[in-house]
Amino acid sequence: MSENIVIIGAVALGPKAACRLKRLKPEANVVMVDQTDLISYGGCGIPYFVSGDVSDIGQLQSTSFHMLRDKKFFQDAKGIEVLTNTRAVSIDRLGKKVLVRNVVDGKEQILPYDKLVLATGSRPRRLSIPGAELPGVFTVSNLHDAEAIKAEVAEGRVNKAVVIGAGAIGLEMAEALADLWGVETSVIEVADQVLPGVVSPGIARMVRHHLEENGVSIYSAEEAVRIEGAEKVERVVMKGSTLDADMVIMAVGVVPHG
């Protein structure tokens, strides 16, 4: 009897594991489950989609031969079943079964497995400060986030943006907004340099100089204490000053998906 392999998560690790397992065990029934409809993409390319360097979201899902890595691709080219818009609800480890639910129509089904791969990745950390849930406050974790951010900017609703966090994603987003969209952009970082724990202070000064030359204001050794606004975000209050904002992007790290 063919081995059943269920993989929960179909963005980065999931597709790689599925394809590798299918090569090693061609007769196995491999099923990938993901709670969204966009799968197998390069998340590190999200800032380039927002900036416009990557014009179409499908480019982040394409192979080197320009084939779109969607549900049909995995089923037809790889022999891997894909359940999109489907969330894993519970795992019966003793019975080796996963209960999944379609997030669109609510239908449930049970997937039996011999091997189970958890490839759920991480989710962005949100600061626990007042106003963090206001409309106009975004995180950068998936293509749906990227589409929402780009739509706000492209439709002219963002004149001033604040990025909280000066790690790689935060700085890439800041440069995309300022340099390519002309948005007045500020970055708040609690450490005393950009890219803390990643580069030396000397390199950090060079990065900061480059950003400031491209119109990005850097507030290091500062902390966002609250976000204010009536119906949507209007300003970010720091310990030392206040920044007006039409958009806030939180880029303060990630935590594992539970």
Image: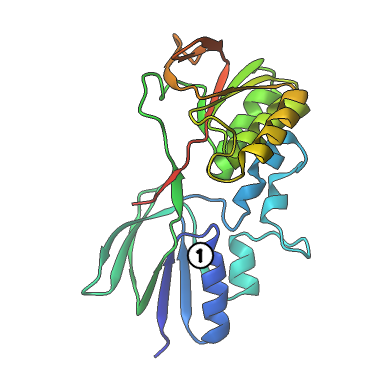
> Which residue is most to the bottom?
1
- Residue 248 x/y as whole percent: 54, 23
Tell me where residue 254 sits by quadrant: top left
The answer to whether residue 114 shows anywhere in this view is yes
For numbered disc 1, what is the local secondary structure? helix
Q: Quadrant of the N terminus?
A: bottom left
Q: Nearer the viewer, residue 181 or 25?
A: 181
- Residue at 35 percent across and 80 percent down: it is 114
Above or below residue 101? Residue 27 is below
Q: Nearer the viewer, residue 174 or 37?
A: 174
- Residue 107 x/y as whole percent: 35, 54
The answer to whether residue 80 shows anywhere in this view is no
User: In the rendered view, does 128 fall on the left or right side of 252?
Assistant: left
Above or below residue 134? Residue 192 is below
Residue type, label 1: Gly
User: In the rendered view, does 13 fall on the left or right side of 208?
Assistant: left
User: In the rendered view, does 67 fall on the left or right side of 116?
Assistant: right
- Residue 111 x/y as whole percent: 35, 69
Which residue does the numbered mark 1 point to in the structure image? 14
- Residue at 50 percent across and 87 percent down: it is 27
- Residue at 69 percent across and 27 percent down: it is 177
